[in-house]
Image (cartoon, rainbow, N blue to C red):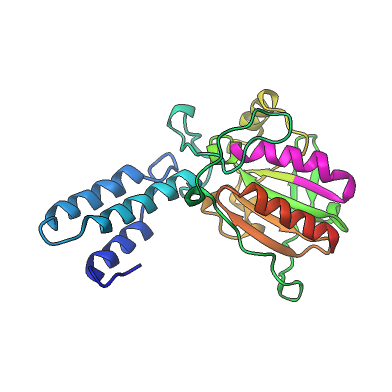
Amino acid sequence: MATQDDPELERWVDDRLATLVPDEEGQPDVDHGLAQLEARRAQEAKRRPIGTWLVGAAAAVWIGAMVVTLGPWPGSEPAPEDRAVSTDATRPAPRGAPAEDAPSPARRFRESALTQISERPDAPHFTLPDMDGGNAMLADYTGRVLLLNFWATWCRPCKVEMPWFVDFEERFGGDGFAVVGVSLDAPGWDIVRPFLEREPLNYRIALADTPERLAPFGETYVLPKTWLIDRKGRIAAEHIGLVDFDSIEGQIRELLSE
């Protein structure tokens, strides 16, 4: 993001944004990042354009609103509700819910198109305990399109997506589609079950509350994370952070038509 006006400071901004460290609760330390930028901006005020600082600050705020970064092990210390990272929805609530003001185009997050069929990697085989006492496995969804969502009870962007996934399950479930939510909360069901009692969902919930259970899915540093898996068990799309409703709905429809 270097510019002709100020390449040195732009490189410094990029370095700082790339190394924002989550605090002890697993939340992005946006305030600390902005403080660093502001201090540097004050030193350079006499010879640097203000637009440079504004670009860096906007990027840091956007990161904090769309995703929640994880510490060494996700969910070990659930963040209190009043301190969790908040987010704005990128889509009005599903059918039957009151419509909200549409966000500006700058706040919408568009994902790329589906991966070409020939280039899709196989989804990892997994076996995870589900909320009904059974085991959720990739093999359960052979021949179906699967939305696999990684989430946690303390992740506010994750909660924004949940009504959308409920809507997808309801509308597309009869067409060979399913949603599985994989909770990364620790200590597991002691936290997840009370949450589901307060916020009932119509799709399956499984648990990856240990590094061993999460290992098949690779490194997971950011929540929410969502995979779309095609009918042959291949990963067709990956969404990091809050999904865009229109984009992921279009991808689901496309996969169902393959």
Instruction: Quarter of the image for the N terminus: give it.
Output: bottom left
Please count the marks in the image: 0
Query: In x, y percent, where is residue 78?
Result: 51, 34
Could you say which quadrant of the image residue 135 lies in? top right
Q: Write the residue at 61% across / 42% down.
A: 91
Q: Write the residue at 29% across / 45% down.
A: 32
Please give left or right for residue 8 compared with residue 81 in the image: left
Q: Write the residue at 78% across / 34% down.
A: 202
> Does 28 appear in magenta?
no
Could you say which quadrant of the image residue 187 lies in? top right
Q: Main secondary structure of the magenta part?
A: helix
Please give left or right for residue 9 compared with residue 206 in the image: left
Query: In x, y percent, where is residue 250?
Result: 72, 55
Q: Is residue 155 visible?
A: no
Instruction: Quarter of the image for the C terminus: give it.
Output: bottom right
Please give left or right for residue 166 compared with residue 211 in the image: right
Q: Is residue 141 visible?
A: yes
Q: Nearer the viewer, residue 181 or 38?
A: 38
Q: Nearer the viewer, residue 114 or 228?
A: 114
Residue located farthest toward the left when viewing the structure as drawn = 46
Q: Write the residue at 75% across / 35% down.
A: 131
Which contiguous range is marked in magenta? 160-179
Residue located farthest toward the bottom when viewing the structure as drawn = 118
Query: In x, y percent, where is residue 68?
Result: 49, 45
Please give left or right for residue 257 compared with residue 99 in the image: right
> Does 167 appear in magenta?
yes
Query: In x, y percent, where is residue 38?
Result: 22, 49
> Relative to residue 224, is residue 193 depicted above or below?
above
